[in-house]
Image (cartoon, helix red, strand yellow):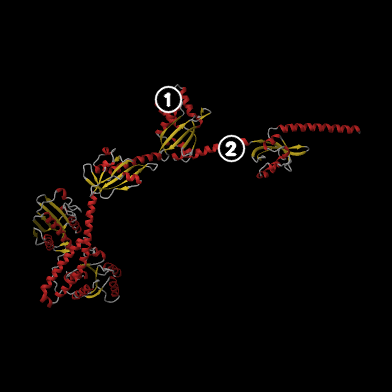
Amino acid sequence: MAWFAFRMRTQVQARTKELRKSEERYRALFESLPAPSWVIDPETFRFLDVNVAAESLYGWTRAEFLTMTLAELRSPEDLPELHAQLKRCFLETEVVGLWRYKTKSGELVEGEATSRVLDFGGRRAIISIVRDVTAARRAAEALRMNEERYRKLFEHSPFGIVEYDYRPTIAWLDGLRATGVTDLAAWFETHPAEVREAMFKVSVTDMNAATLRLVGAKNRAEVLANLRQLFTDDVLAARRAAFLSVWSGRNESEGEITVRALDGTLRRIFHHWWVPKIDGRPSFQHTQLALMDLTEIKSTEAALAAERERLAVTLRAMTEGVITTDSAGVVQFMNAAGGELTGWTASAAVGRPITEVCVLRHERTSALISPPVNAALAADRPVDLPQQTALMRREGLPRLVQGRCAPIHDRSKRSVGTVLVFRDMTDRMRLESELSRASKLESVGMLAGGIAHDFNNILATIVGNLSLALMEKEVAAIAGAWLRDAERAALRARDLTQQLLTFAKGGDPVRAAVLLPEVVKEAAQFALHGSSVKCEFDIAADVRPADADKGQIGQVVQNLVLNAVQAMPKGGLVRIKLRHDVVFEDSGLPLAPGDYLHLSISDTGPGIPPEHLTRVFEPYFSTKQQGNGLGLATVYSVLRKHRGHVTVESVVGQGTTFHLWLPSARVQVDKLGETRSPFPNLQGRVLFMDDEEHIRKMTEALLTRLGLQVTAVCDGDEAVLRYKEARETTCPFDLVMMDLTVPGGKGGRDAMREILQVDPSARGIVSSGYSSDPVMANFRSHGFRGMLAKPYRISELSRTLREVLGEVRK
């Protein structure tokens, strides 16, 4: 028994010694591991043991580790995965995982942990050997980031970048060397087909988005499939240069090429081709080509060149003079107009002081005016030339000018010179003077027109009452001759007011059948009054009436006769001839074929020079000292508005003849010129409107004597109201006769428009003392069927009424 106990004790001691040796071997191995290692309790995650490498890497001592758990080294988000890994250790031989661990200083390090289950002191535990991969991971991350940065630069570069493998080309070139080729350029000349095919064999490995945009492709495959379409002769020449460059030991080349995009458009490209060196040796596998789109730049350069050319052309074509100077006032540039205005050539002016080239004086005082170069530089803003500035040409002749001097700045906004722009105002100032005089004439004309309008209303009352008086037999028997003389005088006054209206407004003619002989004689005699010029008339007895505005034609004759009188201040002869004329298609005159009145007015004056003869009808052209150049322009305008024509012929020293054509009237002039009763009675109801009471009373009496029933109103609103009321009865109005203008109220034009809306068949007559109003000339377009210019005789009134009422005798 004692022996058995001894034997058992001996075996235990042997095993204990063997276990101690095993633990010592484990400890020695565990401690010698270069990788951090530890043993943990799978239930509590508490460290049971750690080696020196773990202490060194993570910063805790072994004693500190033994008071800690593995969870304290892991990030909270890693704990679920940690539990799962430890469970797999009991199911698998070995579990490998990549984890982040915290050091004592708080730094995170990465480690690749290899874990397995072992027997530790008689119980199951988990040993983990952790390989520190922080540096490797950081290096890999740095490499990845570098590659990503390169990729982003590659993809987002505004320049096209193409990478390709140049090794096949090098192999092809080496093959040529092996065959004994020494002069590659000469070989290219004798083997163009082989070279061309070699150039198309491009082994592209990558290209960025900018390259695709340059050629208008969607992807790299589309580019490679269309190389022959993209390659121009420029591209092939660049490829050939690259071959020659490598052949001669130079691994880069650059230049400009034209590339044809897939849509057929041409793009101008700058290219730089090179072979990068890696470890000091050319890496043909990574040959690169950089492409920069110069199309817009070239277009901009072309546009700038065109703009410079346009600027140069503009400066040459400008009528304004342009002179530029430096900051010292020395001329640097002068355009052609500046040369013409100053009398200097540009070559002679450049380099001279502006005060020598551009001599300025006050128009009236002749005081010298300094060009405002210094003033513009000092104020750093544009400075105008003073008013009434005269530029003295090099030969001394002055020209009135207006202009402005402005500073020229460089990129830093510093004044480096000036530009002086000036224009010749001599002709414009003369024209403005003429326009001022014309404006004054227009003002006088407006005054004359207003007086004529009011005077015609007065004359209308006088003529109407004279007509009424002459219709009384007893009055006509006692004072008929006197009353008829008064009537003729009133009608002459009417013609005078018509001339005033023509002078005031001109306007469209109010044409009617006019006997020209009396108009021509009266106008000519008026123009000859007080002169020493004699007038002879040659008027055919069978001339027909003209379709004309009596007042405007009288003004035309007066202008022409007055011109003749002014051309013969010492006396002479004016011949006036009036004939009937027929114009045919081949007459050569700008007139419609038909019957015309041909009026000729000749003088025996000095004649018109040939250089002036073609300009006599131009507005403001005059050779007279005091002329305004409007007389013959008015003649031309009046004849054109009458659908007529005027020409002139002249021989210097023998005189001048004006030929006028006026259309013949289709109706005869009413010979019933005397105001006596009885007139053929008229029938119907007439609505008469005029704002002046005495005219309403007079016209109402005349219309009543003609057999009409009359209702008189004072304005357009009342006229419209009365017309509507009458339509609702059995006695509507047969005709309305209205004054054109009602101060402060509705006139005849607006009233007629409203009446026609109510009754489209309404018949109206418009009347006015302002016969130049466009409504009078074109009354039918405003809805009227007849027109009467104030003052009018009872014969004119009767004829117009009969025409409108449809009772004209056939």
Query: 735 or 125, which lies in front?
Result: 125
Give amino acid for label 2.
Glu
Alpha carbons under labels 1 and 2: distance apart: 47 Å
Relative image position of residue 596 (x, y in whole percent)? 15, 58
The label number, if any, that marks residue 184 in the structure image: 1
Residue occupied by mark 2: 141
Q: How packed is label 2: few (under 14 Cα within 10 Å), some, or many (20 or more)?
A: few
Dot 1 lies on which element? helix
Residue 172 visible in image: yes
Choose top left, top right, bottom left or bottom right for residue 71.
top right
**Image quadrant occupied by the N terminus:** top right
Quadrant, the C terminus: bottom left
Which residue sits at x=68%, y=45%? 80
Say whether residue 803 is left or right of residue 301.
Answer: left
Amino acid of disc 1? Leu
The percent position of residue 322, horizontal first and vertical second, equals 29, 43
Q: Secondary structure at mark 2?
A: helix
Residue 235 to residue 570: above or below: above
* Residue 264 seen in render: no
In the displayed orientation, state which residue is furthest to the bottom.
474
Tell me what residue is drawn at x 18 percent, y 64 percent.
498
Q: Position of residue 588 (x, y in %)?
A: 16, 52
Q: Residue furthest right?
A: 1
